[in-house]
C-alpha cells in the first residue's frame, strides 16, 4: 500500500474533494498542466544500507562507469561531452530531465547539451514542457527574427518555472544560430496542453487556413469554436459548468474532424490539422470532471500521452532530432507515483519509438533552487537543501571522485547496475517545497544519469 505523504499530495487530495467553491474545482490537475507540477517517487523496494564492504558499497563500481562533466555552462569546450554523444548514439529524441524546476545548472546544461547536439549530432529542435501554442510563438521569432527575444520570453514563459534568464539565453542562441545558418535552422516546440491560455491568434492559425482553402466551411468552423475561443485563463474556464465544458470539447473535436476531413496535402494542411488537434486536446482535458478524485490519474495519464503524441508528430513530420526538456518525472520511463501518474511521457515515447528515445535524468547533492510553498498560486522563491543524507541515492553518487559526472546506466558494471536498480530515497522537487525524498530506482527511469555536486537557484528573467 502506497501512502501519499508529501504536503502537495495531501493538499491536492483535499482540494479535489472540496465541492463548495466551483472556481477551485480541478485545480490539482490544472496546476500540474499549467506549471508542470511533479510529485516525488514512491517506494518500490527497500535498499540495503551502504557499507564499506566492497560487495555492498557501489562507489568503486560506479566510478568505472562515470565520465567527468567539466562544466554545465554553455559556450565552453565540449570535449567532455563526446562520450555522452556516444551514449546517445542514433536516438532521434533525447529526454533531458531536471530534478528541480528552478536550478541554474539544470537549465544551463540544457543549452549546453542542445548546442552540442545541434553542432555534432544533427539535432535541430528543442522541445519544452510548455504549451504548444507558446512554442509556436517562440518558433516564429526564431525563424523570422521579428520581435524582441526578451519580450517574447516574458509573454510565453510568464508565471512558469522557465521564466528565467537561462531560457532567454537559449532562445537568443537559437536565433543567432539561425541567422548564421539560414539553410539549416533550429526550432523550438512546446509539447504540452495549451495552458494557461489559448489566444485568438492561435485559433486564427486554423481559421485562416480554412478561410484560404475551404471558405465554404468557415461558418461551420466559426460556430464550432464559439464559446471556446479564446481561453484567456485556464482557471476561469474551469468555472464553466461541466456539461458546457464537455459540449465545447465535443465541438473542438468536430472542428478537428472538419479540418482533417478536407484531406488536404502539404505543409500548410499538416500544421493546420495539428493546431486544431492541439485545441481539441486541451478542450478534452478541460472537460474532465475534476471534482471526481478518480479522475486524477486518468487526466494525468492523458496529459503525458498528449505530450508524447506531440513530440512524435513533430519528429515524424519534420524528420528532425529533438532534445526534449521536462522534469525527471516526465522524461523517465518509470512512473514516480503510479496512483497519480500511471504512465509517463517517457513510457509512451518508448512504446512508440523504442530505442529511438533515450531519457537522461539529473540528480544533485545539495544547493538551492526555486519552488513554491503552496500548491496553488504563490510566487517562485529560493529554497536550500544541505548535503544529501547517508542512504540516499545522491549521497552515494556524491562519493564518486568526480564533482560532476555522467554515466550510462545500461552499460554500467553489474554491481553498479544492481545498485541503480534498487529503490532508495531520492530528492525531486516540483512546484511545491518542502517535500521529503522518496524511494526511486534510478535505472528504472533513465538510460543515462547526470549527477551534480551542487546547484543554485535559476536567475529571474529581468524586465
Image: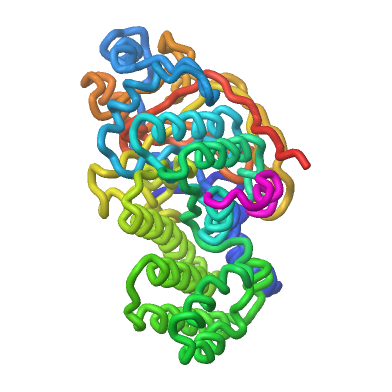
Q: Dominant secondary structure of the magenta stretch?
A: helix
353 displayed left or right of 367: left
Visible in this render: residue 288?
no
Q: Position of residue 186 (x, y in %)?
A: 46, 44
In the figure, 166 relative to 73: above or below?
A: below
Magenta segment: does it hold 93? no
Task: Kindly identify the residue that appears in the image at 57 percent across and 43 percent down.
Answer: 430
Choose top left, top right, bottom left or bottom right for residue 463: top right
Task: Kindly identify the residue that appears in the image at 67 percent across and 51 percent down.
Answer: 147
In the figure, 412 relative to 160: above or below?
A: above
108 displayed left or right of 153: left
Q: Position of residue 227 (x, y in %)?
A: 62, 83
Task: Kindly identify the residue that appears in the image at 56 percent across and 73 percent down.
Answer: 203
Q: Position of residue 93 (x, y in %)?
A: 34, 44
Give the magenta part as a residue range.
143-156
Total marks shown come to 0
Q: By what rule are the colours in the image chosen?
A: rainbow
Q: Position of residue 10 (x, y in %)?
A: 59, 52
Direction right: furthest residue? 463
Magenta segment: does it hold 153? yes
Task: Kindly identify the residue that appears in the image at 48 percent across and 76 percent down.
Answer: 209
216 and 432: which is toward the camera? 216
211 and 246: which is toward the camera? 211
Amino acid at each position: 500500500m502506497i501512502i501519499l505523504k508529501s504536503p502537495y499530495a495531501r493538499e491536492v487530495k483535499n482540494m479535489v474533494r472540496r465541492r463548495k467553491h466551483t472556481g477551485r474545482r480541478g485545480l490539482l490537475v490544472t496546476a500540474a498542466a499549467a506549471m508542470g507540477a511533479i510529485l516525488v517517487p514512491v517506494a518500490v523496494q527497500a535498499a540495503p544500507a551502504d557499507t564499506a564492504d566492497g560487495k555492498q558499497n557501489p562507489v568503486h563500481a560506479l566510478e568505472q562507469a562515470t565520465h567527468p562533466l567539466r562544466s554545465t555552462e554553455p559556450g565552453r569546450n565540449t570535449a567532455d561531452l563526446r562520450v555522452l554523444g556516444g551514449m546517445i548514439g542514433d536516438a532521434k529524441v533525447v529526454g533531458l530531465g531536471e530534478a528541480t524546476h528552478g536550478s541554474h545548472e539544470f537549465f544551463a546544461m540544457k543549452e549546453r547539451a542542445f548546442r552540442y547536439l545541434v553542432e555534432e549530432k544533427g539535432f535541430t529542435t528543442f522541445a519544452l514542457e510548455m504549451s504548444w501554442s507558446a512554442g509556436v510563438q517562440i518558433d516564429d521569432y526564431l525563424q523570422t527574427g521579428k520581435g524582441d527575444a526578451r519580450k517574447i520570453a516574458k509573454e510565453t514563459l510568464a508565471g512558469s518555472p522557465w521564466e528565467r534568464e537561462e531560457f532567454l539565453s537559449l532562445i537568443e542562441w537559437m536565433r543567432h544560430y539561425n541567422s548564421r545558418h539560414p539553410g539549416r535552422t533550429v526550432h523550438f516546440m512546446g509539447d504540452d496542453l495549451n495552458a494557461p491560455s489559448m489566444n485568438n491568434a492561435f485559433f486564427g492559425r486554423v481559421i485562416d487556413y480554412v478561410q484560404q482553402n475551404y471558405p465554404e466551411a468557415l461558418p461551420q468552423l466559426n460556430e464550432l469554436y464559439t464559446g471556446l475561443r479564446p481561453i484567456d485563463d485556464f482557471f476561469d474556464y474551469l468555472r464553466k459548468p461541466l456539461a458546457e465544458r464537455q459540449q465545447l470539447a465535443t465541438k473542438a473535436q468536430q472542428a478537428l474532424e472538419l479540418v482533417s476531413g478536407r484531406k488536404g496535402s502539404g505543409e500548410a494542411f499538416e500544421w493546420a490539422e495539428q493546431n486544431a488537434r492541439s485545441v481539441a486536446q486541451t478542450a478534452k482535458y478541460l472537460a474532465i470532471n475534476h471534482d471526481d478524485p478518480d479522475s486524477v490519474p486518468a487526466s494525468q495519464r492523458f496529459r503525458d500521452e498528449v505530450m508524447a503524441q506531440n513530440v512524435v508528430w513533430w519528429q515524424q513530420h519534420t524528420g528532425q532530432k529533438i532534445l526534449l526538456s521536462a522534469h525527471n518525472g516526465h522524461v523517465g520511463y518509470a512512473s514516480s507515483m503510479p496512483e497519480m501518474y500511471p504512465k509517463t511521457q517517457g513510457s509512451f515515447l518508448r512504446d512508440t519509438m523504442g530505442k529511438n528515445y533515450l531519457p537522461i535524468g539529473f540528480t544533485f547533492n545539495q544547493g538551492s533552487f526555486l519552488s513554491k510553498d503552496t500548491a496553488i498560486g504563490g510566487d517562485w522563491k529560493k529554497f536550500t537543501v544541505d548535503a544529501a543524507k547517508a542512504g540516499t541515492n545522491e549521497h552515494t553518487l556524491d562519493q564518486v571522485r568526480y564533482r560532476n559526472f555522467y554515466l550510462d546506466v545500461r552499460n554500467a558494471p553489474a554491481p553498479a547496475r544492481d545498485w541503480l536498480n534498487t529503490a532508495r530515497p531520492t530528492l525531486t522537487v516540483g512546484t511545491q517545497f518542502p517535500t521529503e525524498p522518496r524511494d526511486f530506482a534510478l535505472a528504472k527511469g533513465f538510460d543515462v544519469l547526470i549527477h551534480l555536486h551542487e546547484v543554485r537557484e535559476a536567475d529571474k528573467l529581468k524586465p
